Image: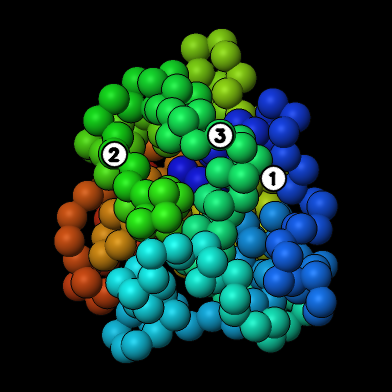
Amino acid sequence: SFTNALVGILVQKGQLNIDEPLSIDEWQADDRKKITLSNLMRMNSGLKWNEDYGNSSDVNNMLHKFGDMAQFTAKQPFEFPADSVWVYASGSTNLVSQIIRNTIGNDAEYFAFPRRELFNKIGMHSAIFEPDASGTFVGSSYLYATLRDYARFGLLYLNNGNWLGEQILHENWVEYSTTVANGSNGQYGAFFWLNRSGDYPGVPADMFCARGHDGQYIYIIPSKQLVVVRNGYSKKGTFDFQSFLKGIVEAVE
């Protein structure tokens, strides 16, 4: 979701067009040349991917064996037509990180970009964003901040990308980010999880969230003017996130 914000800033500045096919060299000889930045952000690029953390999967190989995570992802074969089948693929996020780096075109500017254009502007002074060995920020996995600073990020999206009068994200960016991705059955937008599928019973359908590993969440509920941040370590099935959030919503009504 933080990678979503960095793309949104570049869109606001007129430096990126999310709907143009990507000019990745190894894709030009096959149907991967039709993939857009938006397809990567919506996780329906059609690239083959295995996100199973319990085995020697693509995500584990990418995070632990390859110094250039974007290059690893770019080499994945085409499995489905773009914009049709939804498959969660954290490698797509790291490929977008590389596209951000290429767009900026200067590494000193690139390394300063998240802090200058996002973290400092919204007061996220605790944020640490780690790069891989190639120098590209690992947008899929390696961003850390305090609970309060995660809440600041949620407030940026709650306020439609505006922070104290400055439109940091394009005015239509949050609407784009929370529009259902084709193939996702209402559970995903663009680097944000959605509640359009009703996965959170008793929670408004307009809820969207950033979801980190093993129980890190930033919930944003525009209809309730509410941001909820949850930190912790909870393996799948050990914490009832639906009841947790439903109880908070009911408590503040």
Viewer-proximal residue among 86 and 62: 62
Task: Assign a secondary structure to mark 3.
Answer: loop
Q: Classify mark 3: residues with Cα within 10 Å, few (<14), some (14-19) or many (20+).
A: few
Image quarter hosting the C terminus: top left
Q: Could you give the CA–CA distance between mark 3 and mark 2, rounded to whole angstroms?
A: 20 Å
Q: Earlier in the sequence, mark 1 or mark 3?
A: 3
Viewer-proximal residue among 149 and 109: 109
Eye-nearest disc, 1 or 2: 2
Q: Residue at x 56, y 59 (%)?
A: 95
Q: Earlier in the sequence, mark 3 or mark 2?
A: 3
Query: Is residue 157 visible in this depiction of the protein?
Result: no
**Labels 3 and 2 touching (C-beta < 8 A):** no
Q: Which residue is mark 1?
A: 176
Eye-nearest disc, 3 or 2: 3
Residue 239 in the image: x percent, y percent? 22, 67
Q: Residue at x 25, y 30 (%)?
A: 126
Q: Which mark is residue 128?
A: 2
Task: Give the amino acid type for the residue marked by disc 1 in the picture.
Answer: Tyr
Q: Is residue 119 left or right of residue 192?
A: left
Q: Which residue is mark 3?
A: 106
Q: For residue 49, which quarter of the picture?
A: bottom right
Q: Residue at x 17, y 61 (%)?
A: 233
Viewer-proximal residue among 165 and 70: 70
Task: Give the amino acid type for the residue marked by disc 3 in the picture.
Answer: Asn
Q: Earlier in the sequence, mark 1 or mark 2?
A: 2
Residue 212 in the image: x percent, y percent? 34, 57
Q: Could you give the CA–CA distance between mark 1 and mark 3, rounded to whole angstroms?
A: 28 Å
Q: For residue 104, which quarter of the picture?
A: top right
